[in-house]
Image (tube, helix red, strand yellow):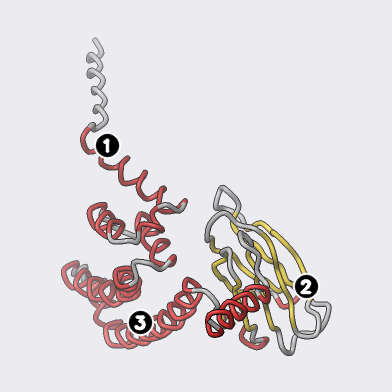
Amino acid sequence: MRKIVSVLILSLVLFSCSKVKKGEFLISGTAKGIENGKSVVLQTQDDSGMMMMPVDTVKVKDGKFEFKGKIKEPKMYSIVFPELQNGFSLIVENDEVKVEVYKDSIQSSKISGTYHNDEFYKFNLDMKKVGKSVEKKMQDFQTKNLAAYQQATTAKDTATMNKIMKEANKIQTAYTDSMLSYAKDHPKSFISLLIVENMFRMPNGDPKKIKEMYDALDGDLKELTSGKKIKDQLAAIEKAKKNPAPQPVPAPAAAPAQ
């Protein structure tokens, strides 16, 4: 009986110590080395998706800062230091997200505290490695093939030019392939949802592949705004396939002048 009471008391203490209220978000930031009074701006895209919109502004005090608010569902935001002309992205959700800002490398600041942000941070680290690898391979490839490509261009040897370009494109697709591989292996991650949504804008986006990736996502992600948007886009593509737009009737040729 004592053990049960102790557990209940401990649970109540832990709950009462929580800094986040139900239905609210809290971003707890540390910014060592950044002077007191420096502005920190929380911003996100507007409804059009074309512009960044400031949501809140606070000041650094004793190396710390906080943002509080409410949000309907997880969404990508940015934390920006205007006076330092730098910032980084994070996923805001109704929970506590912790950020550790590195003054000399703000874009590499650490984000943690929730599953989605833990995954986002690891995803960024992995993609930076992939990016450096792709960049190195492309530099080596260009050094090795530049003379051959220039010679083929002068000789109008399209077969050789196309072969070199095909090999170069294969190296560059490694970055995209890594993103798709992440989404496939992490069906519960919010980043996976954004990757699948972005597939519509990728070169040669295959609706069949997009649907396959979408179907594999966790059900909770499909209920979010981006998840519903993907579903609607796929439905529109399927509808267009079943009911193709009628082709315009060509205008009759003009009668020859007499």
Callout 3: SS: helix
Q: Secondary structure at mark 2?
A: strand
User: Mark 1 touching mark 3, by CB under 8 A?
Assistant: no
Q: Is residue 16 above or below residue 43?
A: below
Q: Which residue is mark 3?
A: 134
Q: Which mark is first along the chain, 1 or 2?
A: 2
Residue topped by disc 2: 39
Which residue extends farthest right? 37
Residue count near mark 2 (Cα–Cα under 10 Å), binned few <14, some 14–19, many ≥20: some
Residue at numbered disc 1: 240
Foreground: 23 or 2?
2
Mark 2 and 1 residues: CB-CB less than 8 Å, in contact? no
Say what secondary structure mark 1 lies in. helix
Q: CA distance from mark 3 to mark 2?
A: 36 Å
Left or right: where 205 falls relative to 108: left
Residue 181 in the image: state x and y as whole percent. Answer: 29, 72
Cα–Cα gap, marks 1 and 3: 37 Å
Report the amino acid beneath label 2.
Ser
Residue 195: x and y in percent read 39, 64
Q: Position of residue 160 (x, y in %)?
A: 18, 73
The amino acid at mark 3 is Val
Which of the labelled discs sits on residue 2, or is there none?
A: none
Quadrant where the C terminus sits is top left
Q: Nearer the viewer, mark 3 or mark 2?
A: 2
Crowding at mark 1 (Cα within 10 Å: few <14, some 14-19, many 20+): few
* Earlier-in-chain disc, 3 versus 2: 2
State the image coordinates of residue 113 (x, y, percent, origin top left). Answer: 55, 77
